Amino acid sequence: MIYKAKLPNINSFQTKALNFSFYPYDLELKHAFTLANSSRKTTPAMLAEIEYESFIGYGEASMPPYLGENQETASAFYSKVDLSQFNDPLLVDEILDYIDGIDDGNHAAKASIDIALHDLAGKLRGQPWYKIWGLNPENTPNTSFTIGIDQADIVRQKVNEASSFKILKVKLGAGNDKEMINTIRSITDVPLYVDVNQGWKDKHQALEMIHWLDEQGVVFVEQPMPKTDLEGMAWLTQNSPLPTVADEALQRLPDVSKAHQVYSGINIKLMKCTGMREAHKMIALAKSLKMEIMIGCMTETSCAVSAVAQLTPLAKWADLDGNLLISNDIFEGAKIIDGKISLNDLPGIGIKKL
Ligand code: MG
């Protein structure tokens, strides 16, 4: 009875408007993120809040530069959002149809509102989303931890630091692929996911490398070839002894059908697909097409990571290390325990603001 008394009166949802607010937040990286000709120590983000009566839903947009959004584009998008026209936060579909229709693009900005609304609606219903969706929290996969392309001594150091993880994800495609794998294999025999980030240009060389990786205990190969090379990718997937996974080649729901028979699986990220509602639909569609499901993230706080973690009982593979890479997380949420994603009982997306 005490538990029930804590729940809000459903009828009262009809009375008040939703109040939306946002502010910029720079995610500070523990280690500089280095690419061929650039290096950065922060990832720009926006934190969003939707308030209704005494409840606050939290959301987040993480915007690594290569995706084309930033704090200015997100602010411009948010300035067009008027949530005061809605007085029932449980009408998630209706509200998110409105958000999606405001403008094209802005996937991360849209995701921040989607996440905040799911957090709010889950709190009003008194349940985490994995329960609302009827998912078994014991079915969450282990997460991988990503090892970037680097010199052998730094790779060895990072692999040693990641010893609590049951799977590592290795970045390849910079010309030293075998050296990277051999360096890691000199330390550990855990299963490896490989992410080439479109780095292989020739399908025959790619297939040869995949055969070698298969012998090294690699589980799948993510985005081996350029996203535009559908023909080469389809050939590679057909001939590959390992599953292939689309990442750069896929953002939103319609992209799932395009990836069918070109890749074996898809890597879903909230910042690409506009949030939890669409991610849930993408999973249903991909499963109906017998495609494998991977769930990933950007560098994010525990807000966005815990939001997407709600879906991980549906995923075969997960790469959710984004919150572990920053030093200024302001949320506590889903945890990694002994390498496995662990969901809690907190309503909404399962977070507490610190
Ligand atoms: Mg990737």
Image: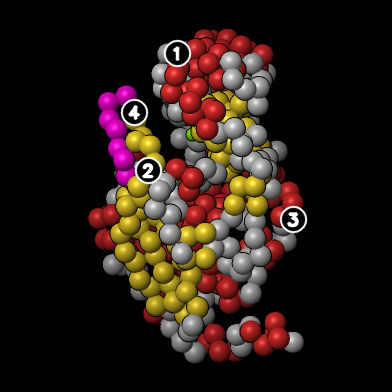
Q: Earlier in the sequence, mark 2 or mark 4?
A: 2
Q: Tell me the magenta residue range.
A: 35-42
Residue type, mark 2 in image: Leu
How far is the residue under mark 2 from the one under mark 4?
14 Å
Q: Is mark 1 within 8 Å of ligand 1?
A: no
Contact between labelled residues 3 and 4, with CB atoms less than 8 Å apart = no
Measure how far apart labels 2 and 1 are at the Cα level: 25 Å
Camera-nearest residue between 270 and 229: 270
Residue identifier under label 1: 176
Up/down of 300 relative to 131, above or below: above
Q: Disc 1 and disc 3: Cα gap in Å?
A: 41 Å
Magenta stretch contains residue 41 = yes
Q: Nearer the viewer, mark 2 or mark 1?
A: 2
Residue displayed at 58% across by 77% down: 124
On the image, the x and y values in percent for residue 354 come to: 46, 64
- Nearer the observer: mark 2 or 3; the answer is 2
Q: Is residue 115 visible?
A: yes
Marks 4 and 3, how far apart in space? 38 Å
The three-letter amino acid code for the residue at tag 4 is Leu
Q: Secondary structure at mark 1?
A: loop
Under 8 Å from ligand 1: the CB of mark 4?
Answer: no
At 42% from the left and 13% from the top, the residue drawn is: 175
- Please name the residue that numbered disc 3 is placed on: 136
| Front one among 354 and 173 | 354
Whichever of labels 1 and 4 marks the residue nearer the N terminus, that label is: 4
Give the vertical position of 128 relative to 39 (above or below).
Answer: below
Which of pointers 2 and 3 lies earlier in the amino acid sequence? 2
User: Which numbered disc covers residue 35?
Assistant: 4
Task: Tell me what residue is drawn at x 32 percent, y 44 percent.
Answer: 42
Q: Secondary structure at mark 3?
A: loop
> Marks 2 and 3, how far apart in space?
33 Å
Which residue position is annotated with label 2?
29
